[in-house]
């Protein structure tokens, strides 16, 4: 079997993104390919699928096959269950955490101008889109929250550096609902430097 065929089959069968190390692990020690060989196979597969309706996408957790974005509206009609609708408050909170992380609940409230409910934070934690990364060294020791690899995977991002600029989001009619009417508060914030965060 060609290495490329094996890698392709494993990625098709996987129910989550796989890293190069995880792809190597499906081989016995005596036949295990080098990382550079696996990466070459991935690149070849990716090139082969460029003209097909399915693409090989790299996200934060690894590589996965997925339907091309422009075809999703038709494919989604196959499924009776619709994706959950998230409230404006939840999307605003998630956006603030993504662009200002690590951030406390008080920091989120200062930007949004309203209280953040415990249920909202719990929902984001349960979806594994955010995680507790520590406590701020101030009276009361408020919890600090950051986004996770699952957040990046869900939104089809490889890293925080792939987050679109806030101005781009605000100009995108499909994404405008993520932000509150107080756009100035968001525009004054810049994406966090990913190197300043610990590994997810």
Image (tube, rainbow, N blue to C red):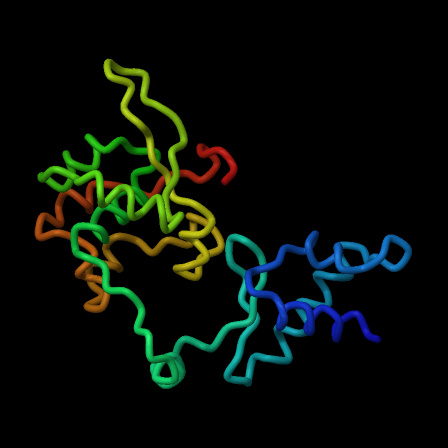
Locate residue 139, reporting x and y percent: 24, 13
Residue at the outermost front position? 80
Residue at point 42%, 48% (across, down): 160
Asked whether 74 or 159 is in front, the reply is 74
The single residue placed furthest to the top in the displayed view is 139
Name the residue located 54 percent from the left edge and 75 percent from the top edge: 55
Q: State the residue at coordinates (9%, 39%).
A: 113
Residue 162, compared with residue 103, is above or below; it is below
On screen, residue 137 versus residue 3, left or right, reads left
- With respect to residue 179, does 130 lie above or below? above
- Of 180 and 24, the residue lying toward us: 24
Q: Quadrant of the N terminus?
A: bottom right
Answer left or right for 193 relative to 48: left
- Percent x, y for residue 147? 38, 44
Left or right of 98, for residue 30 = right
Q: Where is residue 90 shown, x and y percent of the image?
A: 22, 51
Residue 20 occupies quadrant: bottom right
Query: Where does the image place residue 132, in percent across and percent down from the top left?
Result: 38, 34
* Residue at x 39%, y 39% (from the top left corner): 131
């Amino acid at each position: 079997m060609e290495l490329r065929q094996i890698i392709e089959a494993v990625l098709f069968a996987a129910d989550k993104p796989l890293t190069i190390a995880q792809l190597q692990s499906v081989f016995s020690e005596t036949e295990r390919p080098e990382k550079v060989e696996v990466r070459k196979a991935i690149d070849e597969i990716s090139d082969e699928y460029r003209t097909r309706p399915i693409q090989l996408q790299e996200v934060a957790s690894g590589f996965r096959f997925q339907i091309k974005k422009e075809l999703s509206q038709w494919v989604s009609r196959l499924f009776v269950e619709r994706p959950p609708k998230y409230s404006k408050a939840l999307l605003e909170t998630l956006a603030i955490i993504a662009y200002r992380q690590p951030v406390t609940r008080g920091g989120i409230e200062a930007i949004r101008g309203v209280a953040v409910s415990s249920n909202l934070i719990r929902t984001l934690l349960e979806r594994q889109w955010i995680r507790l990364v520590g406590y701020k060294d101030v009276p009361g020791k408020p919890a600090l929250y950051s986004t996770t690899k699952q957040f990046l995977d869900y939104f089809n991002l490889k890293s925080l550096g792939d987050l679109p600029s806030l101005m781009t989001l605000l100009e995108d009619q499909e994404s405008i609902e993520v932000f509150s009417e107080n756009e100035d508060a968001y525009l004054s914030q810049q994406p966090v430097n990913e190197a300043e965060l610990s590994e997810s």
